């Protein structure tokens, strides 16, 4: 089973993201069901590991918080491979991500090799026109979503298909605990 931990997006925020999708020929834009904010990619795991991951994530205590998407960007520098919407700095989000990462590592999963860069992937790119990418980035640079409440995080499974990834929620983990910086 291929797993990741993420925050889902409220309908209104997802709809605002879908309004800025377009204008880059050849981009594979994410569907509404594919829009999320990844806290930790886990990868392929066995059934026993799924149970251990679920138990570890269920033990996380962290506060709920408000979040706002802001700005856009790309990954891939001179050879862009994806477009994304960014997130305003948020210590509570960083706190939750560290707790999720620590829980996953405690049950024997390898360390994530990527630095956490909170974002929502909007499109996958294959040999895009660089001028169109720059144009899209400039046009949507000031994108800002409505602020929204985050009251839970989710464990998702991912099935790779020829039409892109299909995500399924495996488990929800409610937030609402007390934020304590010494708890990271």
Image (spheres, grey):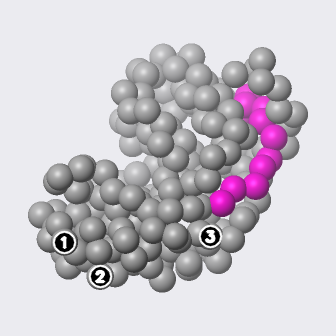
Could you tell whether 27 is left or right of 105 in the image?
left
Mark 3 and mark 2: Cα distance apart in space: 20 Å
Q: Which residue is mark 2?
A: 23
Write the start and end of the magenta stretch as one range: 57-68
| Residue 30 position (above or below residue 56) | below
SS label for mark 2: loop
| Residue 172 position (above or below residue 30) | above
Mark 3 and mark 1: Cα distance apart in space: 25 Å
SS label for mark 3: loop
The residue at 33%/74% (across/down) is 136
Q: Earlier in the sequence, mark 2 or mark 1?
A: 2
The residue at 72%/40% (across/down) is 92
Q: Earlier in the sequence, mark 3 or mark 1?
A: 1
Q: Which residue is mark 3?
A: 145
Is the C terminus in the top left, top right, bottom left or bottom right quadrant? top right
Q: Which residue is mark 1?
A: 131
Along the line of sight, the residue nearer the viewer: 104 or 150: 150
The residue at 68%/71% (across/down) is 146
Could you tell whether 102 is left or right of 139 in the image?
right
Could you tell whether 130 is left or right of 63 in the image?
left
Q: Position of residue 76 (x, y in %)?
A: 24, 50
Q: Position of residue 35 (x, y in %)?
A: 49, 64
User: Within the image, what quadrant is residue 124 found in?
Assistant: bottom left
């Amino acid at each position: 089973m291929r797993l990741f931990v993420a925050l889902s997006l409220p309908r209104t925020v997802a709809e605002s993201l879908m309004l800025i999708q377009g204008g880059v020929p050849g981009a594979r834009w994410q569907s509404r069901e594919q829009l999320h904010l990844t806290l930790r990619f886990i990868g392929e795991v066995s059934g026993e590991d799924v149970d251990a991951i679920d138990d570890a994530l269920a033990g996380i205590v962290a506060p709920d918080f408000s979040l706002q998407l802001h700005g856009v960007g790309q990954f891939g520098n001179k050879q862009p491979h994806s477009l994304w919407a960014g997130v305003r700095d948020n210590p509570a989000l960083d706190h939750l991500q560290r707790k999720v990462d620590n829980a996953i590592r405690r049950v024997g999963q390898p360390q994530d090799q990527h630095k956490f860069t909170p974002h929502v992937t909007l499109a996958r790119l294959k040999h895009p026109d660089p001028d169109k990418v720059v144009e899209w980035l400039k046009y949507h640079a000031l994108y800002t979503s409505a602020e929204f409440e985050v009251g839970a995080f989710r464990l998702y499974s991912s099935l790779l298909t020829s039409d892109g990834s299909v995500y399924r929620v495996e488990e929800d983990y409610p937030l609402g605990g007390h934020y304590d910086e010494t708890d990271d």
